[in-house]
Image (cartoon, rainbow, N blue to C red):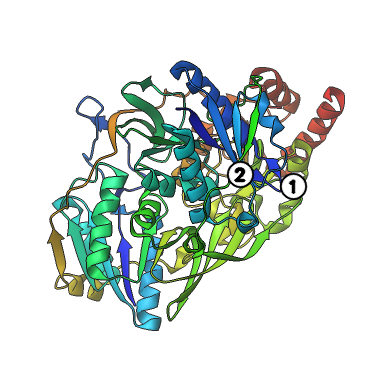
Amino acid sequence: MSILIYAESAEGKFKKVAFELASYAKKVAESLGTTVTAVTVNTANVSDLSKYGVDKVLKVNNDKLSGFTAKAYADVIKQAAQKEGAKLVLLSSTTDSLYLAPLVAVSLEAGYASNVVGLPVSTSPFQVKRNAFSNKAFNITEITTDVKVLGLAKNSYGVFESASSLTEEDFNPTIGDNDFGVKVQSVDKTSGKVTIADAEVVVSGGRGLKGPENWGMLEELASVLGAATACSKPVSDLGWRPHSEHVGQTGKPVATNLYIAVGISGAIQHIAGINSSKVKVVINSDADAPFFKVADYGVVGDAFDIVPKLTQKLKEFKANNS
Amino acid sequence: MKILVCISHVPDTTSKINFTNGDSEFDTNGVQFVINPNDEFGLTRAIWFQEQQGANVTVVNVGGPDTEPTLRKALAIGANEAIRVNANPTDGFFVAKQLAEVIKNGGYDLVIAGKESLDYNGGMVPGMLAGILGYNFVNSCTELKVEGTSATASREIDGGKETVATSLPLIIGGQKGLVEEKDLRIPNMRGIMTARTKALTVLEPVAANNNTKAVKFEKPAPKSAVKLVSADNLDELINLLHNEAKVI
């Protein structure tokens, strides 16, 4: 038996979450005295996985899998798990992996725990800690099946290097036509921009910015930090910013290293969506805004004065520290 | 078209989250329960199909008698009938098995469930339903159209959206976008009155495994107070982010 991870890639390059997942799997494998196998789909160069403790890669190359099809991908992961006799199958928490995991779990008759935030609390019985109640609590879940599927919450473990010698093996799972009942027609993706899902830093604006015309200064701040931009629900409801930027309970979840909220009061629904971020900074003219209760650092004052100054100072800081 | 909307009965967003019985159970004391927001978007889209395309909408919940007011609310919003599977929803797979039984027996063409509930945040029931039944499945669905037995849907992807073509029978993991927030409906008096006379069928559960169990709950450690930095001293903020938080 080994641990199987699905190492996700985009345009032939591994996503950072794949390395986080590998780091996590390596640590669990050490405690169980086993090895880590990764399954990859249409990724030509897999050597980077050897930096994070992966022992073996099952490389799947198949033109049928050039677009993401959940059933077919789930089928690939299931067959890889069976081939390896994996008792533990690990996925990340990207939208694609969240889509796959329950399908994989059912096909392997495995119990599934999502939103896992740390190493297993115990391996026998097998218990993990996970986020629940929209990040307002943790839940210790026990998985009672022989095969187990875990979804690791983004940015909850970290990336740790651990060199290994990697064996590569071509793997050709059987993919049936009935795996393709959902066909991709078009993909509409903003290119060349840091997405909220991939960003290490997110700069977010609320109604305090008064209008869409004032987003330029946030974009400048984001660009200095290599950050993605986001917004609160009222801002997307007013149509100032696209829905894809809405973060919060009913929008996108954010689990970045640094979240900077400008002119966002901090409604409970907003906080629920961003609370997994490690460090939170708030800039708001209202010292009583609820966001100050959950933030790590705060500046009380006029965003229109503070943001351009902060951008300028960060530029200087980056120039001196690069 | 027969539509089944799966409804989770969850604490209102603003509820205080506490646990009882040695931190093994959620403390429902003083908590207001609502239709899970992701399910409410799906329900409203289903009602749109009912009004525009003559669909019949059933709502279903796996839970105890205390969840019936939530189902009645869904009926007041416009669902034609309701089903409650009389069981404690202890595990995602167990719940999916109960719902799969309802779907098989009811012959539903379209099943809409929220992509996740806001209490346990498992995010697994719609996918497991698709796995158990072998139906087509679109998760994180933000747009849905049905013509005959063909369907077009959009789903959220990291950094954008993807449009897919598929066919019924279909399982949807829904979210905001299926309808907009402003289109969500508050039950009116007439809806509430007619909801009282609509059928709410109680079914006993079928035998199914629990693959997981919630052992215990914990609350996050209390946060230390915010460090305030003067607007005239932003160098200090950069210093803290660099040297203390180490995030820049």
The amino acid at mark 1 is: Glu
> Mark 1, residues whose alpha carbon is within 10 Å: few (<14), some, or many (≥20)?
some
Q: Quadrant of residue B25?
A: top left
- Tell me the number on the disc at residue A197: 2
Give the CA separation, mark 2 to mark 1: 17 Å
Which chain letter goes with mark 2?
A
Which chain letter goes with mark 1?
A
Specify whether B211 is left or right of B182: left
Image location (x, y in percent) of residue B222? 42, 23
> Mark 2, residues whose alpha carbon is within 10 Å: few (<14), some, or many (≥20)?
many
Residue shown at 57%/52% (left/top)? A246
- Do pointers 2 and 1 mark residues of a single chain? yes
The amino acid at mark 2 is: Ala
**Of B91 and A274, which appears nearest the observer?**
B91
Specify whether A6 is left or right of B219: right
Residue shown at 71%/40% (left/top)? A227
Image location (x, y in percent) of residue A264? 57, 44
**Of B114 and A79, which appears nearest the observer?**
A79
Q: Secondary structure at mark 2?
A: loop
**Of A268 and B248, which appears nearest the observer?**
B248
Proximity of marks 2 and 1: CB atoms separated by less than 8 Å: no
- Tell me the number on the disc at residue A219: 1
Q: Quadrant of residue B38?
A: bottom left
Where is A26 relative to A308, above or below? above
Specify whether B210 is left or right of A240: left
